[in-house]
Each structure stands twice: as structure tokens, then as C-alpha cells.
């Protein structure tokens, strides 16, 4: 029985480590995809701005870059919301916020100004990987 409890604890610790590594990889992939889609969007915008072409083609190029750019931003926010936790600076509670609160919160990098569900205070909450 004692050996069974140790194995269960080891499995739990291993599962937590795997989740943390997975969250780190997701956040890294988020940055890479954001940079790539931004480069594509800016390239298409640059071509549409300076190349000689008809207006309908110019609008098509801009929309071809803009629509995937917006979709990627929404997916990136979903990744940021789900991977890891946010830590309240007032009560140090770590939690996963709702998608809409992450979407509409003011932010600087991965620090967002949100309301903590535990203490109901607004503060700048940093993204952390482990709970």
C-alpha cells in the first residue's frame, strides 16, 4: 500500500511537469506563429502599397493578409488564456481566466489588468506556468 501511494505521487508529479513543459512549448509556438503571420501580413501590405496594380487586386491582397492576421491573434489569445495561469498581485491566487476577460484586458506582453475571482480586486496579473 505504501509503494502504491509513492507511485501515485510520482505519477502526479510527472503529469504536472509534462503540463508545464507543454504550456511552455505552446507559448513559444504562439510567439513564432505571431511573428510569421505578421511578416506575411506586412509583406502583402507592402506589395499592395507600392506595386502597380488595379484597386480590386490591391484590396484583395490587403484582405488576404488581414483576415488570417486577425484569426491568428484570436487563436494566440486562446493559447495564452489556456496555457499556464495568471497570478493576482494582491492575494497571489493563481487561476485560469475566461477568454473574454483575457481578450478585453489591457496588457503589456503577458501581464494583463484583470479582476481576480478570489479577492475581486483589479491588478496587473502576470502569466506564470506552474500553479
Image: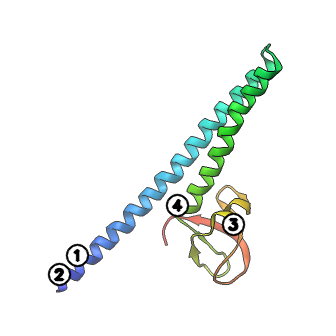
Tag 2 and tag 3, C-beta contact below 8 Å: no
Residue at 18% x, 86% y is 2
Left or right of 130: which side holds 69? right
Mark 2 = which residue? 3
Marks 1 and 2 sit apart, C-alpha to C-alpha, by 6 Å
Tag 1 and tag 2, C-beta contact below 8 Å: yes
Vertical relation: 4 (above or below) 57: below
- Label 1: which secondary element: helix
Mark 3 = which residue? 101
Residue at 68% x, 64% y is 100
Marks 1 and 4 sit apart, C-alpha to C-alpha, by 27 Å
Which of labels 2 and 4 is toward the front? Answer: 4
Classify residue 9 by image quadrant: bottom left
Tell which of 98 and 80 is nearer to you. Answer: 98
Q: N-terminal of the two: label 1 or label 4?
A: 1
Residue at 59% x, 61% y is 81
Mark 4 = which residue? 83
Marks 2 and 4 sit apart, C-alpha to C-alpha, by 33 Å
In the rendered image, residue 5, in percent from the top left (x then y), is placed at: 23, 82
In the rendered image, residue 69, in percent from the top left (x then y), is placed at: 67, 40
Which of labels 1 and 3 is toward the front? Answer: 3
Left or right of 34: which side holds 124? right
Marks 1 and 3 sit apart, C-alpha to C-alpha, by 39 Å
Residue at 41% x, 63% y is 19
Left or right of 23: which side holds 87? right
In the rendered image, residue 111, in percent from the top left (x then y), is placed at: 67, 62
Q: N-terminal of the two: label 1 or label 3?
A: 1
- Label 2: which secondary element: helix
Q: Residues within 10 Å of mark 4 (few under 14, many from 20)?
A: many
Mark 1 = which residue? 7
Marks 4 and 3 sit apart, C-alpha to C-alpha, by 15 Å
Amino acid at each position: 500500500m505504501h509503494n502504491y501511494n509513492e507511485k501515485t505521487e510520482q505519477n502526479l508529479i510527472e503529469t504536472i511537469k509534462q503540463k508545464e513543459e507543454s504550456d511552455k512549448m505552446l507559448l513559444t509556438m504562439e510567439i513564432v506563429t505571431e511573428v510569421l503571420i505578421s511578416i506575411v501580413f506586412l509583406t502583402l501590405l507592402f506589395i499592395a502599397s507600392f506595386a502597380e496594380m488595379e484597386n480590386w487586386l490591391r484590396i484583395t491582397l490587403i484582405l488576404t493578409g488581414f483576415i488570417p492576421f486577425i484569426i491568428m491573434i484570436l487563436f494566440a489569445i486562446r493559447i495564452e488564456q489556456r496555457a499556464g495561469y495568471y497570478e493576482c498581485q494582491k492575494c497571489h491566487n493563481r487561476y485560469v481566466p475566461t477568454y473574454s476577460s483575457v481578450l478585453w484586458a489591457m496588457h503589456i506582453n503577458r501581464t494583463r489588468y484583470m479582476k481576480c475571482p478570489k479577492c475581486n480586486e483589479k491588478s496587473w496579473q502576470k502569466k506564470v506556468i506552474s500553479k
